[in-house]
Image (cartoon, rainbow, N blue to C red):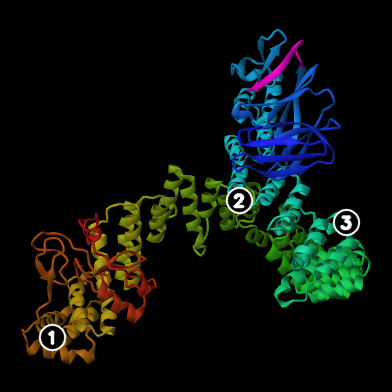
């Protein structure tokens, strides 16, 4: 009896449960043979022993019967564990042994019973109670004795750290069998091995304890398993849960069986597919999901292809073709597989036909490579060409000696190696034009030059190739060719180009072509070569060339010695001498050249421009500025005003670049010359008043224009009269009628000028006023010195007027200031800066908001 049931058995094998509360039979089970004993558990299930002395555990809930291993006729009794932590534990005893069993209702493989321990039965004692691993025995004297089973002895004091490793492993194994998870955790921590934790996690899964498995996998940091288990944790369908857990534990047959018995049998198919077990997947697909057979066949075929099972792969590729519009891409892949496998199985015509039909370059390349390994050259080349792999196609055509096809592909080939192979074949056939073109495409310039010289008799083309490619060997070939033709100048040129300077030098000496050699070697030869050339020209009394090459060889003293002996017509000699002195940086050589330029050496002073260049080369800018002023005066005196302007402008920029203060005389002369140059521009754009004002400025400095005093004054009179500046016109007309000037007046203007003087008109249109950019005092536009703050004001290069704080810009080339709106007018008319004469795009002009960059500089305060 139990608390709720009366349970009895019969010798016919019948077990019946009588529920006492309702007073009726509620369950019965018929065994195959008679039952002699039953041992019920308080929760309802029981152990029975039949008349064959075999033991079984019976579960009345589902009538499930599990055999108990190791029972025999000597069994005296069975004790169920009464502690709640060990619900499935029981012991069977006889006169000699006590055996401990664990019964698990639910495991991955169903219900099972397992013997976990066996020990000797104490003499003259009989077990009467099992509680928490402790057996209470009744001694024949009537005394009760307690002993702890070895399965539980390790849990008595929890001192796991003191146990040896082997004992810990043994205890962990027992704890796992008994499903004592808290003790398992403690033992695993004491062992501290990942493999031990993994074994424990697998044990919990086999016992379907998912919650415990999740915690263990979290502890060992296995997020993938945690996530997978959490997904199935709340599943209600037991077959699905067992299927997934079996899959996690790699028991795939059990997993498949469970999935097939569940509401989601396709999971078994997905599992086999994921495992790449295509045979099993195909068998399942035929039953569960026929629509997936083509995709499985394709994937199976791809694996078979990789393993070399080409015949089977071909069959599966063919089975994978659906001929459905929605599966077009899939069918192309299968057809490609059919093409490859057909070629491998020897059906080349079929494979090539399919590969050509499918627009897939990768497939065509794969098939071509297979054919190439089979030495099927025409078919391989055809597929390479079809896939636009022209280099590979040409290479295969060459293997098949099909030069005609190679020639057709030549323009698409990028491999130099193939071009060279083709060129050699054409050269061997005597087709030199095609050969030279192929060598050219391969960039094999030496062979291009060789064919031009030896076979095509085209030295001009060979020479052009050498000049373009700088081929050393090619240059030597061309040089030898021209030597044979006695064209020594050309031969020398190409010998130098090929680096054969000694040979070129000897050839030049032998054939009196040293000047040709000298022009060719340029600045890249060695000092020794330059010295040899210099000595040759010195012996020939060619002082200019001797000096030039001594300069190139860094023999500055020798260079100067010969350069100052040059004749006057050798204009470049002095410039070379200045260059030698600059490079030498030697005071004695500098004095020697200075004396020569001043005429103290030969009594013939040289042009001042050379002295100016010398000072510039030596970075003596103040002296250069002084000479520049002298030169500009000489130019002005001879009427070359633009050249004088350019000399001063160039010097101005040099001094400005080296942050040297601009001499007042230089800046003033530049301003006056610039004002004169602007007159013509403003007359052209009909700005007559501004042109007149600028001419008044020039006329006030008329002594600086001695050669054109009368024409300038005449222009001033005419422009002032036209602009309404009648009083100014009268003043300069009166000046013209002085005795020293009136004889040079142009007759066509004489009467007009005389009329202006006779009929004096004192009217004068007042000049417009603008603010001084320094002190804001109002002053006339063309006034460049403020009478209040006594400051020199920078002038606008477009108008000659002083600059303003607003509407300001600069020339992007020379960086001189200008009034933005006025500069635009000049550029629209002439497109060039009036100061530096460089072309200026209007788009490059930018408004400058800060005038201080022009106002507070050394030259503006000079």
Q: Residue at x 81, y 41 (%)?
A: 31
Q: Residue at x 74, y 44 (%)?
A: 250
- Answer left or right for 513 relative to 401: left
Between the residue at mark 1 and the residue at mark 2, the CA separation in whole angstroms equals 110 Å
Instruction: Give the residue pinned by disc 2.
Output: 235
Query: Which part of the image, by quadrant, shows the N terminus?
Result: top right
| Mark 1–mark 3 distance (CA, rounded to whole Å) | 107 Å
Residue 138 appears in view: yes
Where is residue 299? Give x, y as percent: 78, 61
What's drawn in magenta, residue-wise? 120-133
Indicate whether 8 appears above or below 619.
Answer: above
Contact between marks 1 and 3 (CB within 8 A): the answer is no
Q: SS for tag 1?
A: loop
Which dot marks residue 308? 3
SS assignment at label 2: loop
How far apart are the alpha carbons under marks 3 and 2?
43 Å
Q: Earlier in the sequence, mark 1 or mark 3?
A: 3
Q: Residue furthest right?
A: 346
1 vs 2, front mark = 2
Point 35% across, 57% down: residue: 654
Q: Is residue 423 visible?
A: no
Residue 724 image offset from top left, x and y in percent: 13, 85
Within 10 Å of disc 3 (Cα), the crowding (few <14, some 14-19, many 20+) is: few
């Amino acid at each position: 009896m139990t608390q709720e049931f009366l349970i009895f058995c019969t010798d016919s094998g019948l077990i019946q449960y009588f529920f006492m509360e309702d007073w009726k039979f509620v369950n019965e089970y018929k065994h195959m043979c008679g039952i002699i004993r039953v041992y019920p558990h308080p929760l309802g299930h029981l152990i029975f022993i039949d008349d064959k002395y075999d033991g079984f555990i019976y579960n009345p809930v589902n009538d499930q019967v599990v055999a108990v291993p190791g029972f025999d006729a000597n069994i005296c009794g069975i004790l169920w564990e009464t502690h709640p932590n060990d619900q499935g534990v029981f012991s069977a005893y006889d006169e000699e042994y006590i055996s401990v069993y664990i019964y698990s209702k639910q495991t991955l493989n169903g219900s099972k019973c397992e013997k976990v321990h066996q020990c000797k039965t104490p003499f003259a004692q009989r077990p009467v109670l099992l509680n928490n691993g402790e057996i209470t025995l009744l001694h024949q004297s009537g005394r009760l004795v307690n002993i702890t089973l070895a399965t539980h002895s390790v849990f008595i004091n929890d001192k796991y750290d003191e146990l040896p490793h082997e004992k810990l492993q043994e205890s962990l194994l027992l704890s796992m069998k008994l499903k004592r998870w808290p003790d398992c955790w403690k033992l695993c921590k004491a062992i501290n091995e990942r493999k031990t934790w993994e074994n424990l996690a697998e044990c919990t899964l086999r016992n379907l304890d998912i919650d415990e498995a999740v915690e263990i996998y979290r502890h060992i940091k296995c997020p993938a398993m945690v996530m997978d288990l959490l997904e199935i944790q709340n599943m209600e369908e037991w077959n699905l849960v067992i299927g997934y857990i079996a899959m996690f534990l790699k028991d795939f047959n059990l997993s498949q069986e469970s999935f097939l018995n569940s509401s989601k049998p396709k999971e078994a198919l997905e599992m086999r597919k994921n495992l790449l077990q295509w045979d099993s997947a195909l068998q399942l697909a035929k039953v569960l999901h026929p629509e997936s057979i083509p995709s499985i066949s394709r994937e199976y075929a791809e694996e078979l292809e990789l393993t070399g099972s080409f015949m089977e792969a071909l069959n599966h590729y063919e089975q994978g073709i659906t001929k459905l519009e929605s599966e077009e891409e899939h069918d192309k892949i299968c057809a490609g597989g059919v093409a490859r496998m057909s070629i491998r199985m020897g059906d080349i015509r079929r494979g090539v036909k399919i590969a050509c039909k499918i627009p897939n370059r990768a497939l065509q390349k794969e098939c071509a490579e297979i054919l190439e390994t089979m030495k099927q050259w025409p078919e391989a080349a055809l597929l390479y060409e079809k896939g636009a792999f022209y280099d590979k196609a040409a290479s295969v055509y060459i293997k098949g000696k099909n030069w005609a096809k190679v020639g057709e592909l030549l323009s698409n080939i990028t491999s130099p190696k193939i071009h060279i192979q083709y060129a050699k074949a054409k050269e061997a056939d005597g087709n030199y034009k095609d050969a030279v073109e192929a060598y050219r495409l391969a960039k094999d310039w030496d062979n291009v030059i060789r064919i031009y010289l030896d076979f095509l008799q085209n030295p001009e083309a060979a020479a052009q190739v050498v000049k373009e490619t700088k081929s050393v060997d090619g240059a030597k070939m061309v040089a030898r060719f021209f030597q044979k033709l006695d064209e020594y100048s050309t031969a020398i040129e190409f010998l130098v180009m090929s680096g054969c300077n000694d040979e070129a030098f000897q050839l030049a000496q032998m054939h009196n072509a040293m000047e040709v050699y000298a022009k060719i070697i340029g600045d890249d030869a060695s000092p020794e070569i330059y010295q040899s050339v210099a000595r040759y020209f010195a012996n020939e009394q060619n002082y200019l060339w001797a000096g030039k090459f001594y300069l190139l060889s860094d023999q500055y003293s020798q260079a100067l010695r010969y350069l100052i002996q040059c004749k006057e017509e050798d204009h470049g000699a002095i410039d070379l001498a200045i260059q030698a002195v600059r490079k030498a940086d030697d005071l004695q050589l500098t004095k020697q050249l200075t004396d020569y330029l001043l005429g103290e050496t030969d009594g013939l002073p040289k042009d001042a421009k050379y002295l100016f260049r010398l000072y510039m080369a030596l970075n003596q800018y103040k002296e250069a500025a002084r000479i520049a002023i002298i030169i500009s005066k000489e130019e002005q005196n001879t009427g070359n005003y633009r050249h004088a302007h350019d000399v001063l402008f160039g010097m101005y920029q040099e001094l400005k670049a080296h942050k040297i203060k601009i001499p007042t005389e230089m800046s003033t002369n530049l301003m006056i010359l610039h004002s004169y140059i602007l007159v013509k521009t403003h007359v052209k754009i009909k700005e007559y008043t501004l042109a007149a004002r600028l001419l008044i400025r020039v006329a006030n400095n008329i002594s600086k224009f001695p050669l054109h005093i009368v024409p300038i004054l005449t222009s001033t009179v005419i422009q002032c009269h036209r602009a309404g500046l009648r009083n100014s016109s009268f003043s300069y007309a009166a000046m013209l009628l002085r005795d020293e000037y009136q004889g040079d007046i142009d007759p066509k203007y004489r009467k007009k000028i005389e009329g202006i003087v006779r009929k004096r008109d004192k009217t004068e249109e007042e000049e417009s006023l603008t603010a001084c950019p320094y002190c804001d005092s109002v002053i006339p536009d063309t006034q460049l010195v403020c009478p209040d703050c006594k400051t020199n004001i920078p002038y606008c290069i477009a108008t000659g007027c002083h600059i303003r704080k607003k509407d300001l810009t600069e020339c992007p080339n020379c960086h001189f200031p200008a009034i933005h709106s006025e500069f635009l007018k000049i550029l629209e008319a002439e497109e060039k800066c009036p100061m530096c004469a460089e072309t200026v795009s209007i788009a490059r002009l930018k408004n400058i908001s800060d005038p201080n960059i022009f106002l507070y500089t050394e030259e503006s305060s000079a």
